[in-house]
Image (spheres, rainbow, N blue to C red):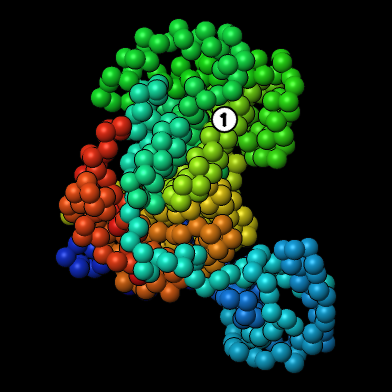
Amino acid sequence: MKNIRQLYRLAGLHNVQTGYFGMRNIRHYASADSLLAVLKELGAPVASMNDVPAAIREAELAKRRKIIEPVTVAWNGARPLIKLTLPAGISEKTRDARLELESGESLEWQFPVNELPVIESGEAENFKYVVRKLTLPQRLPFGYHKLILHGSGKSCETLIICAQRSAYSPADIGTARNWGTFLPLYALKTGSDWGSGDYSGLNALADWTAGEGGSVVGTLPLLPAFLDNPYDPSPYAPVSRLLWNEFYVDINKVPELASCPQAGEMARSFAAEINSLRSRGQVDYRCIMSLKRRVMERCVQHLKAAGGTRHEEFQSFIRETPLVEDYARFRAVMEKQGKPWGAWPEHLRDGNLQDNDGDEAVKNYHLYAQWQAHCQIGEAADNARRKGVSLYFDLPLGVHPDGYDVWRYRDIFAKDISTGAPPDPVFTTGQNWGFPPLHPENIRAQGYRYVRDYIRHHMRSAAMLRIDHVMGLHRLYWIPRGIEASQGVYVHYHTSEFYAVLNLESQRCRSVIIGEDLGIVPGYVRTTMARHGLHRMYILNFELADNAGRTPRSIPRNCIASLNTHDMPSFAGFWESAYIMEKT
């Protein structure tokens, strides 16, 4: 029992739950093996129960030797609470401080250490400490700022996220009845597609919805997927959350199709195959992507040979989006290696890619495909705004373990862990979703840069963003490698920091946030969502108005509705239910 109590104590120091209430409100306790594996992944030096006492001492001492937290939140521009943990009896008189604002401005000053108010004192492993409160000399503008402290020959810093307490919401969201259409983009067949919906179809749907009086168009994630080798078309296992899916590029709208005779001739030669693909009840991802890729490969070859204004636009896109070249090189190396990046030679695995490590033509294809996807998504977003329609995009919880994001940013992912869910009435043995979770401390050390980037990537185009499994802002169910899904463990995140990033980006982009909170959700999640202005979801079935009314009945006020109907003669493949995003 003593060993278990010590293990639970160590778990608490690392924000790991030792149990949870499952089906029929029965308490489930995490096994020692699961806890040890999760704690090891979080950085605790434990291989067995014998290591736990020493790991406790190390964790407690590390906590007290950390002068300042890596991230600090300031709500609504107020001066944040900045805690400095210092050795008791410290003799230094002053420390230097430098506040670097996101705008590039900076402020420097000195402060008397021993005159700062004491808010806590104690002792850990014979280390006596005192916690003092540092107050900034001014209020902060909204943004990401850095506070750097120097003293006693050491430096430390914290990222200050100054954010609005509430996410963005339009002024009329509490009074207007807003409805719109929702469907997977692959199901939106327009008659000119190549066997699957595309970004032009998204434009057409926005036009139709606006004409019917709707104001929202939603779809599943539009992020790149593995559609060759490996093959995983799931929109919830993307290669990256930072780019767009070239599968949905409308080849008919690619400018080089008209200027490149070879590409045009190739596209025309596919006519019979395309007609066959259109007539099928299911989407043949491999075949469609193969056809589109062959045409885009010809297009980019022609573009590079022809030069001119279009080529300069292409080069400008690459210069302005440096991430895309790194991504294209990654995809080219993966094709040349013919295996996931975890099995690559060490120098490639560690991110040191050279141009000759992959085929140049493959890299150029991925650069061009991303350019086309970027342009067509941008056109869809601009068209929707002109029509008064909000594009509603879906942000998946995770990314494919063999994908670009995990390869490039591996230090912020828990590599030997999968995300999932405990047993429930439908999945009685639990769920293992197969992708690694973000490491709660390493993303803080990185200043949430990756999180900020993928949220901003979506919100540039989406006036509304659905956060898949919003509980992940609070805690995630971690399943160590080799352990059954039913034996997973909940790990908590620094929730206020996640919400600060979300709210700041939401306000900057004027994008509404919807948290997917369907299913069994702890009460504190919805309370926090309400406090920060996130909208929630639930499922309704309802009747449609008659053709004269044009407005669905039975939609509650204060809701934004994304409905699906068969009463749209130009499109097919709609669902029967409706998602309602209600402001809490």
In the picture, which quadrant includes the C terminus?
bottom left
Q: Quadrant of residue 179?
A: bottom left
Q: Please name the residue shown 60% across and 19% down the image.
A: 256
Residue 63 in picture, x, y percent from top left: 59, 73
Q: Please name the residue shown 38% across and 36% down the image.
A: 185
Q: Residue furthest front?
A: 548
Q: Secondary structure at mark 1?
A: helix
In the picture, which quadrant includes the N terminus?
bottom left
Q: Compare residues 498 and 213 and report the one nearer the observer.
A: 213
> Can you say whether 36 is above or below 567 in the image?
below
Residue 287 in picture, x, y percent from top left: 40, 18
> Can you say whether 392 is above or below 153 in the image?
above
> Can you say whether 140 is above or below 272 in the image?
below
Q: Please name the residue shown 49% across and 22% down the image.
A: 252
- Identity of the amino acid at label 1? Gln
> Can you say whether 340 is above or below 384 in the image?
above
Residue 9 in picture, x, y percent from top left: 43, 73
Mark 1 closeness class: few <14, some 14–19, many ≥20 residues within 10 Å: many
Q: Is residue 509 visible?
A: yes
Q: Is residue 492 visible?
A: no
Q: Quadrant of residue 4?
A: bottom left
Residue 72 in picture, x, y percent from top left: 61, 72
Q: Please name the residue shown 75% across and 92% down the image.
A: 115
- Residue wearing tag 1: 372
